[in-house]
Image (cartoon, grey):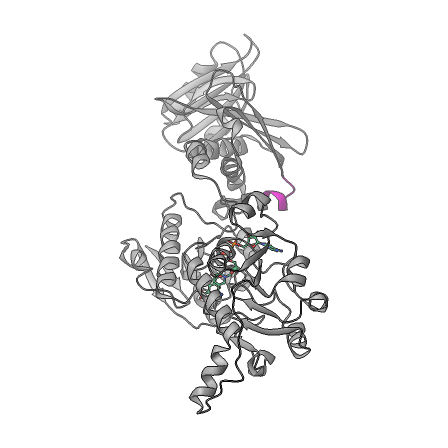
Amino acid sequence: MFKVLVSDPISDLGIQQLMDAADVQVEKKTGLGEDELAAIIGEYDALLVRSQTRVTEKIMAAGTKLKVVGRAGVGVDNIDLEAATKRGIIVINAPDGNTITTCEHTFAMMMALARHIPQAYAKTVGGVWDRKSFLGVELRNKTLGVMGMGRIGSEVAKRAKAFGMNILAFDPFLTQERAEKMEVKLASVDDIIRNADFMTVHTPLTPETRHMISRPQFEVMKKGMRIINCARGGIIDEVALVEAINEGIVAGAAFDVFEIEPPQIDHPFLSNPKVIVTPHLGASTVEAQENVAIDVSEEVLHILRNEPFKNAVNMPPVAASVMNRLQPYFSIGEKLGSFAAQSANQAVNEIHVDYAGDLSDVDTLPLTRYIVKGVLAHHLGSGVNIVNCMHLAKSRDINVVVTKASKSKGFTNLLTVTLKTQNNEETLVAGTLLNGYGERIVQIDKFPVDVAPEGHQILISHNDKPGMIGSVGTLLGQNDVNIASMQVGRKIIGGEAIMILTVDKAVQKDVLNQLTTLPELNSAIEITL
Ligand SMILES: NC(=O)c1ccc[n+]([C@@H]2O[C@H](COP(=O)([O-])OP(=O)(O)OC[C@H]3O[C@@H](n4cnc5c(N)ncnc54)[C@H](O)[C@@H]3O)[C@@H](O)[C@H]2O)c1
Ligand SMILES: O=C(O)CC[C@@H](O)C(=O)O
């Protein structure tokens, strides 16, 4: 039974599929502090949050069973991604579910700003009929600067076009071609600052975007600018903004987000008549909250059930077409990694993966992750998974090298894993998928073999002499070890050779020691896949 903790207000309808799942138990405990959450998180397999819960290193460390943190929304700046990744905890978000809702809130804020709606409301309900103080401006023919043309920024630009606005757009990933298609003008930050009448920001909060609009920008800003921030507090320097408003550079601002949330009661925005504020409501509609909850619940279920999933934030996204080609090889890849690690009896400092065949033309990183996981899990245990394996390899100075070749020797795809040890020993194992036969190991070191990578195996290195197979078989029989299959690999008659046996049960260390006493037998290793 998987236990899921929901620590922020998330739509019940959205998590219904979790609550209906026979293998899942959902508990809702909102408003917890860090210590309270750290005290209980150890019993949960998944944690669902919005933006209130801060999932810190301390909580990750206490989450010894945590497989996934699901963010019912876009921004994950409330989640310590590095702490999650190094512990192999997958972080997923719901990047699409609240796009339109936030875009519409942005527009609501822009209109409110243009027409002084909250201020006029407050005065009217206060009994003052004041029709002079709230002269507004039209949006038509005004210039809107959009910083960040992702999901939300693009939708805002579309609607602004419908309002007859001219759009200046800045985004490091916005091409001239896409800008033309969207009928926006590709601009720099400086262009927007100097020419726009309204500016709206829709970027993530990153070291690059933090205070991207600050004192230097306000000093050259077009006088009378109106600024909207429904993205993240901190993108716009709040102190510098208040100064710019008080100096008459900025005509007004509408903020849904703050550098620190909730803002302190003495926050300067809360007393400035030219600043409109809402309490991080950008995603707060029935529809958005259902969408993001459904999206994140679906992926949490997949992850708990060890099924393919999407929207992982601490893993690169993989196109479905690529995933479909790679996925059949995940299992053999992991087994090859594990086989190689069990065969190598020295500390590994390089994992070399060679892809030969059709797979050479796709991004094989997701498959490499399974191979590296297979290598590391042998020594590091179940704490290794596809999320943290590359991080763990790097942190142990294990170099992961990938090479590709479009042709392979007789196989559609041949995966070759070579482990290099600190004293330059190499351990090689190659495998593939054979149509109709499934997973196969086809080479061990320099020896061709044909072995199904499953169960308990004994890998024997010996000299190619008559009677070797009989001696091994007899000794195993004397120890009640039944042989399911046996393969011999050699390159030249009378030279070095290997035996790979599949046996019905785990082999006692003593039996392995007995095998190494046989004449002409050099080593015997048990491998479990
Ligand atoms: N107020 C809310 O409740 C609310 C709701 C949803 C999203 N958000 C926030 O809004 C922001 C945008 O969300 P989204 O779904 O559009 O994200 P997105 O990832 O689709 O788009 C973000 C865009 O910002 C661009 N970008 C990154 N760095 C930039 C920079 N230095 N200058 C200009 N552009 C830059 C990226 O290239 C990307 O196109 C996120 O921070 C998200 O957390 C807030
Ligand atoms: O959960 C919310 O209400 C806000 C979500 C929003 O900030 C986001 O980044 O998606």
Magenta span of residues: 392-398
Q: Quadrant of the N terminus?
A: bottom left
Side (left or right) of 171 relative to 374: right
Viewer-closest of 221 and 92: 221
Q: Is residue 127 above or below residue 197?
A: below
Q: Is residue 102 above or below residue 262?
A: above
Q: Position of residue 230 (x, y in %)?
A: 52, 66
Q: Quadrant of the C terminus?
A: top left
Q: Position of residue 294 (x, y in %)?
A: 35, 56
Would you identify the image quadrant in which residue 81 lies?
Answer: bottom right
Q: Position of residue 291 (x, y in %)?
A: 37, 58
Ligand 1's quadrant is bottom right
Q: Is residue 317 above or below residue 61?
A: above
Viewer-closest of 466 and 189: 189
Is 396 one of the magenta-colored residues?
yes
Viewer-closest of 50 and 467: 50
Would you identify the image quadrant in which residue 211 lies?
Answer: bottom right
Is 186 one of the magenta-colored residues?
no
Would you identify the image quadrant in which residue 263 lies?
Answer: bottom right
Side (left or right) of 57 relative to 288: right
> Residue lying farthest bottom?
127
Report the number of numbered marks: 0
Q: Position of residue 218 (x, y in %)?
A: 69, 68
Q: Can residue 420 be seen here?
A: yes
Residue plotted at (67% across, 57% down): 191
